[in-house]
Amino acid sequence: MFQHAVPPMRISFVRTRRKLLQLSSSIIRRYCSKGTADIRNIGILAHIDAGKTTTTERMLFYAGKTHNLGEVHRGNTVTDYLTQERERGITICSSAVTFPWNGKRINLLDTPGHIDFTMEVEQSLHAVDGVIVVLDGTAGVEAQTVTVWTQASKHNLPRLVFVNKMDRPDADFEKCVEDLRTKLDTRPICTQYPAKNDEGHLSIYDVITLEQVHWQQKDFGRSYKKVKVEPSDTLRTLEEKRNELIDQLSGLDDELAEVVISTEGFDKVSNELIGHALRRATCQQKVVPVLLGSAYKNIGIQRLMDSVNAYLPAPHERNQIYDCFGNDLAAKVFKIVHDKQRGPLTLIRVLRGELKRGMRLVSSRGQAEVVSKIYEPLADEYREMAVIKCGDVGICSGLKSTVTGDLLTASQTSLKNAEKRLRQSQGLSKEALEEDDAANEMFDIEPQIPDAVYFCSIEPPSISSQTAMELALKQLQREDPSLRVSYDAVTGQTVLGGMGELHMDIIKSRILSDYKIDVDLGPLQIAYKETIEAPAITTLNVEKEIVGSKQNVSITLELVKDHSELFSLDKSPENMNNLNALRPRILQVLRKGAISALERGPRVGGQVVDTQIRLHNATIGRGTADSFVMATAAQCVQRLLGLCGTRLLEPIMALQIVAPNERISTIMADLSRRRALVNDVLPKGDRNKLIMVNAPLAELSGYSSTLRTISSGTASMTMQPCGFANMNPADESLAVERAQGLA
Ligand SMILES: Nc1nc2c(ncn2[C@@H]2O[C@H](COP(=O)(O)OP(=O)(O)OP(=O)(O)O)[C@@H](O)[C@H]2O)c(=O)[nH]1
């Protein structure tokens, strides 16, 4: 699909990162630090319905960005701006908002909580330096909390936890903190504790300042009052908690430890010193500060924003690997959205240099682009700006071929210079760098798109809307790379592949609301793959006359089990002369035709994988059209697939289940009925166990509600696709019957 006009830079990521992290802090400070100390790029992550969108709405309101409080149930929130989001009250696509807070500029990305949109979260995490994880105070750590937590760990992101919904009588702060310790294996530092009066109104004790903070409801929580806690049992308890906090922190932070030793007591340690130590420990991911409140009841949000400023890192404190660009532009694309008036809009994080209106850019794929306009992000509202500064996040229009995950630079020279600087800083030869495949990780040329686990057919309401539907799908696919669109030549249908029922359903509704096409979706089916049973070789001779011109192809292909390459040449002595005589263009055409036939296996139409096509021989008659060569190659592979026979591979999900010890046997018994393979059972704290298990997707329909029932709501779970596996013959026959609509 993409032109590789410039070979992607190949740079040793692992070695590079290690070496760059060792660079002296003077070099690190040289680039991009000026001005970025006042920026915070943060993500907000949570399990579905924990309250991210409500929390974001409050932040915008208190920062003066909005003048009314948006509510999810009223469908008037800023960040959930898609019709489907407003109707369903859920976040589907990440959106970015920018607001000022106490002298800092916060760029916040609200992300979806549902497992079907995990890819959306993954992309956003490339653009942030820290994360707020919102917990529902009545539910603690839930399935998707574990998933997003793991994703944030993968990106090495410092975190804050906000325990929301603390207004509810069934909220349990202590349980949430315990969950953080046991289910997420982290070290929580509570900077606040909840206080409720006799009527159940929530206020907050600040453990560091020893104050009680009350929020005023008449101005929607805009103002709040801090009151020093009077000498009492409560004050003594708070002082104990403050001492515990200092004790915990000084065990992790030498600077604080020195002060504690020299002042001979915790009570002499200033709030400022605690703040600095907490910031260092948070940025180094040694601890996670925990705050609380109620977004819905307008309590605690300003303190959360203060904590973002105080404890989460500024852009220049991360991503030092991009220092090789000096002051030249290096920017990462983390999302594409389509706006009816403005066309495709590209959400960008500038890592080094500046991105200006009208600027010419080169993507890491070698494609040239021109930025036409730049906007400040506020969900679906756009305010024009002239420049996106280093460390900042913004939106550009005018980029035509850039896709999510691309690295944008000012020119190819700048890209080459960055490579050179990187090589020099490491003393490595060009060849040594080029040999290293890990370059993609730095430049992320291909974002890691999860394999589709479900598919269904999609039909336009009439033939006349086919082209409009294809265009809509193309645009949606650019926005959402986890949506797969293919054409089934056998049934003549367009086929959608995706991550789940909700994912497909949202695509259908978006095509209706945004493109006014009422498409029909076929039944949702599991996306099996196929692999050949045994190797086979065959020769196909095809001769035809098309419009008076003779078309003639003779081709010998072999299919073998191999996952290293899709297509190779069998250069044994008897084939050598023939293959060497083939022109590169013809080879390309043959390759394209042959590979296209692997898209649809003979058993259930699944993609054929772990299979290599070997070209032994090809003779192409003079004047034979490329399309004829391509079709013959595809036909030859189809014949071979029939000769080889194929086996099904089914999608497997990796589950991590945390449950109390006494529930483990019930859960294991249920798992054994689901063809699950238990990898490990580990203790998680004193009372819980972590079960790590792989199970076929086909056996997991409705599993999260079953788990809730059999564990009486005490277990939590994360689930993500982890590949494909062979099936036994009985299960395979059943799957084939189901796919053919016979079972
Ligand atoms: N009682 C109470 N309800 C809340 C609070 N915060 C949010 N809610 C409600 O919880 C529901 C979910 O809130 P959202 O803000 O949409 O949650 P979300 O995490 O953005 O949801 P997704 O984006 O769909 O994952 C809504 O009905 C909110 O009104 C709170 O502090 N207290």
Image (spheres, rainbow, N blue to C red):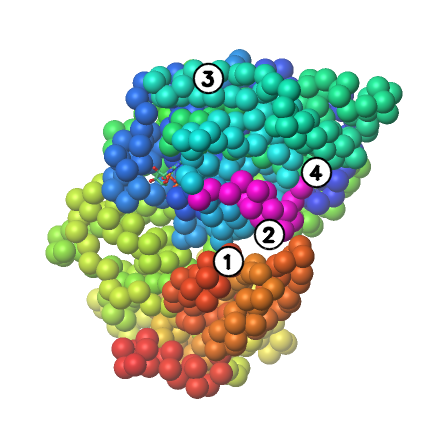
Front residue of 584/124: it is: 124
Looking at the image, which residue is at 62% across and 15% down?
34
Magenta stretch contains residue 179? yes
Q: Is residue 240 left or right of residue 710?
A: right
Q: Is residue 712 left or right of residue 466?
A: right
Asked if the beta carbon under badge 3 is closer than 8 A to the nearest atom of ligand 1, the reply is no
Please identify, in this view, whether the residue under mark 2 or under mark 1 is nearer the observer. 1
Can you tell which mark lies on residue 183? 2
Please identify, in this view, whether the residue under mark 3 or under mark 2 is nearer the observer. 3
The residue beneath circle 3 is 224
Check contact, mark 4 vs mark 3: CB within 8 A: no
Looking at the image, which residue is at 34% across and 63% down?
455
Please identify, in this view, whether the residue under mark 2 or under mark 4 is nearer the observer. 2
Q: Is residue 25 left or right of residue 125?
A: right
Mark 2 secondary-structure assignment: helix
Task: State the predominant SS element of the stretch in magenta.
Answer: helix
